[in-house]
Image (cartoon, rainbow, N blue to C red):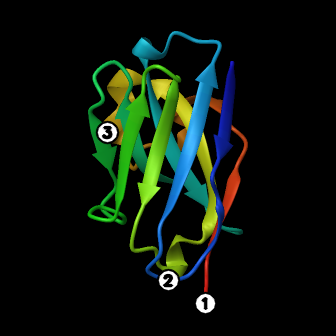
Amino acid sequence: VQLQASGGGLVQPGGSLRLSCAASGLALDNYAIAWYRQVPGKEREGVASIRYSDGVTYIANSVKGRFTMSRDNTKDTVYLQMNSLKPEDTAVYYCATLWAQSMSTINLYSPDELVDYWGQGTQVTVSS
């Protein structure tokens, strides 16, 4: 199983970025793919998830209205579109797989309890 995350970078406050996570090696229809983020000294925070079979998404309250998720079935890739970025969005962002029925619990349970596979992180820095 491989999850390849990309798209991070440096952006000014109010700007946008789109993160990508390309998955391979598993039957995605049984899974959800989530984005977590982590800053030094803090636990990983669930940001958003998408149930791959039907595209239903869950967006954490902390980013609701600014972040959205989508998927491209032809590429086995999910996207996290981040708009109106704030300095507090600065973090390393990780994509991860979890069972589809757990998709809306990413803020209720530790990622250790939910996540099956992790991708490598991609740094997002929001700064002027």
x and y percent of residue 91 in the render? 62, 66
Q: Distance from label 3 to label 2 (Cα)?
A: 28 Å
Image mark for residue 86: none
Q: Nearer the viewer, residue 75 or 98?
A: 75
Q: Amino acid at mark 1?
A: Ser
Q: Which of the two discs, 1 and 3, sits closer to the camera?
A: 1
Give the SS element for disc 2: loop
Q: Earlier in the sequence, mark 3 or mark 2?
A: 2
Q: Earlier in the sequence, mark 1 or mark 3?
A: 3
What crowding class fits label 3: few (fewer than 14 Cα within 10 Å), some (14-19), or many (20 or more)?
A: many
* Residue drawn 44% across the image and 43% down it: 109
Q: Nearer the viewer, residue 61 or 16?
A: 16
Q: Are marks 2 and 1 in contact (CB under 8 Å)?
A: yes
Q: Quarter of the image for the C terminus: give it.
A: bottom right
* Residue drawn 30% across the image and 29% down it: 55
Image mark for residue 13: 2
What crowding class fits label 1: few (fewer than 14 Cα within 10 Å), some (14-19), or many (20 or more)?
A: few
Q: Amino acid at mark 2?
A: Pro
Image mark for residue 104: 3
- Residue 105 in the figure: left or right of residue 42: left
x and y percent of residue 4 in the render? 68, 35
Q: What residue does disc 1 label?
A: 128
Residue 25 visible within the image? yes
Q: Quarter of the image for the N terminus: give it.
A: top right
